[in-house]
Amino acid sequence: MNLESQVTANVKLLEDEKDGYKLSINLKIKGKNIDNNQLDNLIKKANQIWPYSEEKRKNMELTLEIDSISH
């Protein structure tokens, strides 16, 4: 498989009345030569080992957008 990928991050600093500030992160993941299910599974696995997965997410909003093109 010749997987090509591109990740675009949109990061915002939001004011939070309770905790002061928090991050809002939107990751747009594009994959080529992979179907949506495979890409979704790969992203879920990567999200589990992402260094900010546990404690940091309590003060962070994370959204993922997935777009794949299979050839």
Image (spheres, helix red, strand yellow):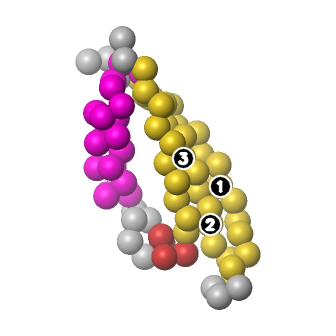
**Badge 1: residue crowd in 10 Å (few <14, some 14–19, many ≥20):** few
Q: Contact (CB < 8 A) between labels 2 and 1?
A: yes
* Residue at the (63%, 85%) spot, across then down: 19
Residue under numbered circle 3: 27
In percent of width and height, residue 27 lies at 54, 46
The residue positioned 70% from the left and 65% from the top of the image is 13
Q: What residue would you read off at disc 2? A: 23
Q: Secondary structure at mark 1?
A: strand
- CA neighbours of label 2 inside 10 A, class few (<14), some (14 to 19), many (20+): some
Q: Which residue is mark 1?
A: 11
Circle 2: element type: strand
Sequence-first disc among 1 and 3? 1
Residue 69 position by quadrant: top left
Residue 17, placed above or below residue 61: below
Along the line of sight, the residue nearer the viewer: 50 or 34:
34
Secondary structure at badge 3 equals strand
- Which segment is the magenta one? 32-50
Q: Quadrant of the N terminus?
A: top left
Indicate the amino acid at tag 2.
Leu
Q: Which x, y percent locates residue 40? A: 34, 40
Q: Tell me the tag on residue 60.
A: none
Query: Residue 7 or 41: which is nearer the viewer?
Result: 41
Question: Does residue 19 appear to the left or right of 41 in the view shown?
Answer: right
Amino acid carrying mark 1 in the image: Val
Disc 3 crowd rating (10 Å Cα; few below 14, some 14-19, many 20+) is some
Q: Is residue 45 magenta?
A: yes
Instruction: Say which amino acid is labelled 3.
Output: Leu
Q: Is residue 17 above or below residue 56?
A: below
- Whole-percent x, y for residue 65 in the image: 51, 42
